[in-house]
Each structure stands twice: as C-alpha cells, then as structure tokens.
Amino acid sequence: MAVLEIESLTKTFDKVTAVDGLDLAVGEGEIFGFLGGNGAGKTTTLRMVLDIIRPTRGRIAVFGGAPDRRRAERIGFLPEERGLYARMNAIDTIVYFGRLKGMTHGDAHRRGMELLERFDLAERAGSAIGDMSKGMAQKVQLATALVNQPELLMLDEPFSGLDPVNQGLLEAEIRHASQRGAAVIFSTHVMQHAERLCDRLLLLRKGRKRFEGTLKQAREELPAQLEAVAQADLATLRGVASATRGEPCGAGWHEWRLELAQGVDPGTLLEHCTANGIALRRWDEHRASLHDVFVHLVGNEEVRP
Amino acid sequence: MTQNILLVARREFRQVLALKSFWLTLLILPAALALGPVLGRYLGDADAVHAVVVDRSGTGVGKALEARFAEEDDRDVLQALSRYVQRHELERADPAAPWAQHDRWYTPADIAAFRQGGGLDGARTKIARVRQGDTPEFDAPAPEYIFDAPPPALASASGKAFGDIAQALFRSKDETRPEIVVLIGKDYPGDPRIALYSANQPRGRFVATMQDVLTGDLRTRLLAREGVVGEAARSVQSATPLIAVTTPAPGGGAKESMQVRSIVPLVLAYILMMSLIVSASWMLQGAVEERSNKLLESLLACIRPEELMYGKLLGALAVGLLMIGVWVGCALVATFFTQGAIADMIRPALAPVSSPGAVMTIIYFFLTGYIAISILFVAIGAMVDSMSEAQGYMMPVLFAILLPITFLLQAVLVGKEGFLVNALTWFPLWTPFAVLARLGLGLTTWEVLGTAVLMAVTIAVEFMLVGRLFRASLLATGQKPGLKIILERLRPSAEKL
C-alpha cells in the first residue's frame, strides 16, 4: 500500500517554479531517496507533504488522504535546518514533540527514555540542550522525529552536519524504521548514503523529475564499461558500442577498454565469449556509480561527492 | 487544536517562569511594599529631636517655650486622634471630647480640655470601650521635640566657649545628644537677641514657633510697660480669629473625591502599562525563539501556525496575568493589613470600582488591552530572525503606545477630560488604558459598551491580519520585513504561501 502518493505536483513562488509536475509513490517499508542539487525542489516537496506550504497544483495523498496535521501522529520529520529549545532539557524536548504528535505524557516519556538509552544519552536526559555538544543535540533532534514510531519518516538532508558516528547511528535508525514497516523518505545530495540505503531513488533537477527507480535501474541509465585482456578483436562483438585496443601484453594478447550499448548486460556478453571460445585472461566490469548517474542526469555542478 | 495550543502555551509559560528576570520583576512590587514602610522609617526623620534651652534671663520664657512645644505635640496627637475616630466612627466613645469634634482647629482651650480628660491615655481608655475587635489601635504620632536639661558645662559656659561646647555636643555619639541649643541671654528682654545653635538646618516650624512664643512674651512686656496688664494684656495677645476649618472626610471633597475615585483605575492602567513593558521582551523572546533556534519546521510539521501563535499568546497572557495577580494581591494585602495614609486613601478608593459592573469592565479591558498589544509583539517576533532585530522594531512600537498613555494618565489625574482623553478612548491601541483610567471619573454606559465592542472587533481583525503575517513570515528567513513586504504578507493570498 502506498503511504505517500504525489501526482502532478507543482509549486511556484512568484515567477519561480520550485516543483514542476512531480509524480511519485512510496510504499510501506520502503527507503526512498530524494536526490537533487541545491534548489532542486526537495525541501519544497517535503514541506508540501507536511502541509507547511500549499501546492500550486497537483495532488498529495498521505495515508490515502490530503496532507493534514491530524496525521502528524503517524509522521516523523527531521528538517534540514535543525535546532531545539536551548533551555529545555533533552527528555522534556522529546516529550514536548511527542505530545504535539498526540501522544500521552507517559507514552512520550517512556519512548523518549528508550530512544535516549539507545543513543547513549540516558544519563543526559535532564541536561539542557544548550549544555550539550552538537552531536548530542543532533541525537536528541533525531529522537524527536522518532518518538512517535512514525509510519512515514521524512528526513531532509539528514546527514548534513553529522559526525561519522552519528551518520552510522542515523543509517541504523533508517534501516530499523524500514524493517518495522515505516516508509522512509530522505533527501540528500550525498550519493554514498543513497547508494547504501535506498530501495528506490528519485532524481530531481530544477523541480522536474529526471529519474525514478531502483539503484540497479539508475546504473542502467549509463552504458556499462569493462576492461578485458583477449587475443580476439572484441570490437566486433555484438552489443559493444565502442572499443579501444590498448598495449599488447604477451604473445597475441591485448588490453581492451569496452563501452557497451545501452541496456547490454556485461554478464550476457561474457557468456557469449565463453560459448564462442573467445579466450580471455581478464574481465573487469566497471559498474557506474550513483554519482556517475547523477552527473549524467542532473549535471556535474549540482553534485557533492 | 486546543490541546496543541495549551501545550505551546504551557511551554511558553514554563520557559518564562524559568527566567531569573521574571522572578526579579515579579518580586519588585511585593519587595517595595514590604520594604517601603521599613525604609520610610529610616528615611523619614521620625525620631524626636532633642533640644536644650539655656535661659539666663530669669524671666521664665524658656519654660514658656518648652510648654508651647508640648502644646504643639498635643495638637498633633489630637488631630491624628480626630482622623482616627472619624475614620472608624468612634465618636460615641465621648461625643464631647475635642477629638470627637472634627471640623475645627484645636485651640489652646481644646488642648487644655484634652489634657483635663486624661490626655492620650484617657482618650484610649474611652475609645477601647467602644472599639470593635477588627478596628486597629490608634498609633499616636511621636513628639517632635524633647527638651532636656542643659548639661552643666553648657549651663556655665559663656561667649565663644558656649558655641564650642554646643558644637561638641552635636558631634557626640550619645543617642540623646541635643541637635538644637537655644540661648536666652541674661539681658533679655532688654536685649531681645536669642542665639540658636543647630546641628542641622533647623526646621521652619521650630523657628516659627519659637518666634511666636518670644514675640508674644516681648509684646506682653511692652504692653505692661504701657500700663496694659493682666486680663487686658492677655485679651490683646489672644485677639486671634477663631478659624473654623471644615475638612472633607477621607475620600470626600470634590477634587480629592475625584482623585480618590481615580486611584484604583489609574493604578490599574499603570499596572497594565508596566506589565506590557516588562513582559514585552519575554513575549518577543518567545516569538523569536523558534526562528532563531531553527526549529520552526519541526514544530510546523506537528502543529498549525495558528496553533503556535495562539499558544504563544496564551502563554504570554498567562505570564502577564500571573504577574499582575501577584502585584494586585500584594497591594491588596498591603492595603488591608496596614495602616496609614495609603490605606486611608485606597480603602475608600476601592468602593467606586467594586460594583460587579465596574469589576467586569476592569477585567474585560485589562484582558483585551493585554491581548491587543501582545498580538503586536508576537507579530514583530514572527517577522524577525533574532532578538536584537526584534528589539529594533519593539522600541518605536512601545514608544508609540506608551507616550500618549503618559499624557492620558496625567490628564485624568488632574481631572481633565479634554479632546485628547476622549480621542484616545476611541483609538483601539489606547482604548483599554483610557477606559481604565477614566473609570473613576465616570464613563457613560454607551461609552463602555461602544469601546468594548471596538476592542472585540479590533482583536478579531488583529487575529486575522497577524495570523496571515505570522504564517507568511514563518519560513521567510533572512528577509528584512520592510513596509512593502509586511503589506504583501497581510494579503489573504499570503496565507497559502
């Protein structure tokens, strides 16, 4: 069942179109990456899903209905710009957000303490946020998003500003949320996190969708490349778009750099070589990274490695 | 919706209560009320001044001088006793006693009658018989001067040595050291020069009384020399008009009555003004906090902007009302559990504003005034990114609100209800202050009802406009809100962002 469905979503601010005809759907237990450079429309889309701002056109369905704060009790959100009440202590902060999401004080407190224990912060439950380190405060902020065990967890650039330890913690929490059936949507322009976590991806450029699919499908957007050492002329093989013969390496053997035609699987080509008695001493596939795909689809200027 | 508003309000309330500045502000008035009488005792010159009269003339004028000051002390006691008896309606204790006759200047004959009736002790005994249990005891004023016998060294000194000894006495550490020394020379009345040594600037009343006694004595002697003696001389000396002074009862009289009636309303208008001034920074801090701490988006994912705004307002209102409640409570405690001039004024002052209608009017305009102006502060807080930026906007707004109010309070205090006072009554920003301040002077029913409707409409419009501004400004960080931007955000379309 789709937790979130978006159809033809458009948002314009004066003369600027921030989101342009976007369609997407995210199901239960799915980790969905929302990729794009700065100003691609990721945050605007998430804000519209949360009903913080209203769409100019299009339809959003959250749990089958229009965006509404009454559904806040089923949603967790971690914004890109993060901060908490400096004078409030950690547990009170989590309880406050839990209560705003419709939880009872007792449930919010119990769940808050569970999260703080999981984040190694139980001893600092009574400490004011202003007295905590940045890393600790980030964990408390994450706890405010998770306190209600959301069925839809939305994270806007969640890894930005996190130290490596907290990045690992966040990845674990995202997987944990997915395992218990929550739909997780996170926006990022750091491709490594998306590569490690996402079941499906959506690439945005200037408010428009450039790609939506699995990581495998994303990689297929770029032709496969491989390096091989063979005696035969590999340029003549069917499915090879271009081939470059390199230096000789032994009697009759040459290095080859091959770029396959769109949609040709390197494995199928290898099977063809074996079946036809083409001798090979090396066969290295160079799989396209998400970064390569992103640069290919969105443009080099909008990506951060 | 209500649940979220209450949650936000409670957080705002608790946050302000955690501020040291709140408790300092809250306790300023009670501390002042508690310390006032104590400090007054130390600041005021309540202790009797010790004086010494060295009379070397042999005429007995020195003793006459002391007797006259004793008479003045008794007159002070009589006047205070008279007001006490009048205030508590205790005349039946002895209707013929001078202290039961209020509208008069107490003559030497009255004072003599007072003494004959046992003086202060005699009066207290009579009053005790009719005094109710809840009527406080009479607190007699202390005598102004205590005349001591001259120290031997002073009594025997003369010339420059006399002055030196007097100065040495003034500098001594003895608590009963004299502060005034009067020397009547041996050649008096032939040589009418009197030397007055004083440790400080002598009080005008002391010099005037001394002058009066010595003038009388000199004239009596002059009359005697001219052959006017005995009863004839006394008649000449005592030929003074008998002035019957009719003073209004406490709270009576036209101007005094108006002022007394206006005390509580004016104080309420003043408290409203003060509470808004002191809580303005807390309100702004609360309104700016989410923006400056970058947690608006987290909040707006859970609650509507309107809930956030109403919650903040409610929190600010609760803080303000708590503060005002404590202040008013302390003032009432101070009024009913203390004596003195302030209590004398406030007790009758409460009477004209204690009717149900007046109480409802006070509460209504107090609340609407607080809300109407708090909304402006919340709107400022919603538009800016930091507290320092907010203060830049707050100062002109505060000045614009408060400056006319100071004129208004001053005008009402002197009983003037001119164009300005009437005009301010119908400008919503100043309506609550004007209505509260004018309650003592008397407002017509249509004025009260009309301004009440005006305030209700104003707050409704404020809620609508500030709601738009609040919503449109929430996520617009880093943009200086000029007039054009503010007007754009006030448009209905701005709500949809």
Image (tube, coloured by chain):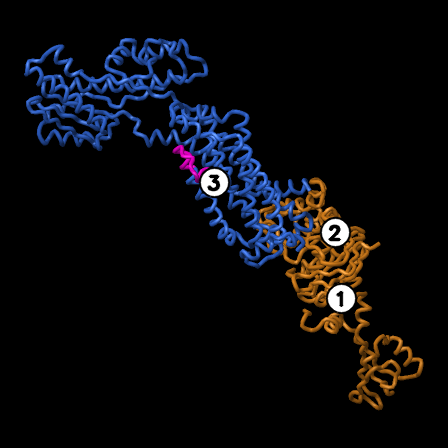
Decide if residue B57 is on the left or right side of residue B422: left
* Residue B202, horizontal then vertical, whole percent: 21, 30
Decide if residue A22 is on the left or right side of residue B111: right
Instruction: Choose mark 3 or mark 1, whichever is in front.
Output: 3
> Looking at the image, is B433 positioned above or below residue A254?
above
Q: Quadrant of the N terminus of chain A?
A: bottom right
The secondary element bearing badge 3 is classed as helix
Query: Real-space Cα distance between discs 3 and 2?
Result: 46 Å
Amino acid type, mark 1: Lys
Q: Residue at x 24, y 22 (%)?
A: B146
Chain seen in orange = A
* Chain letter of the residue carrying label 3: B
Q: Label 2 belongs to which residue? A: A67
Q: Label 1 belongs to which residue? A: A209
* Chain letter of the residue carrying label 2: A
Q: Label 3 belongs to which residue? A: B424
Q: Quadrant of the C terminus of chain A?
A: bottom right
Amino acid type, mark 2: Pro
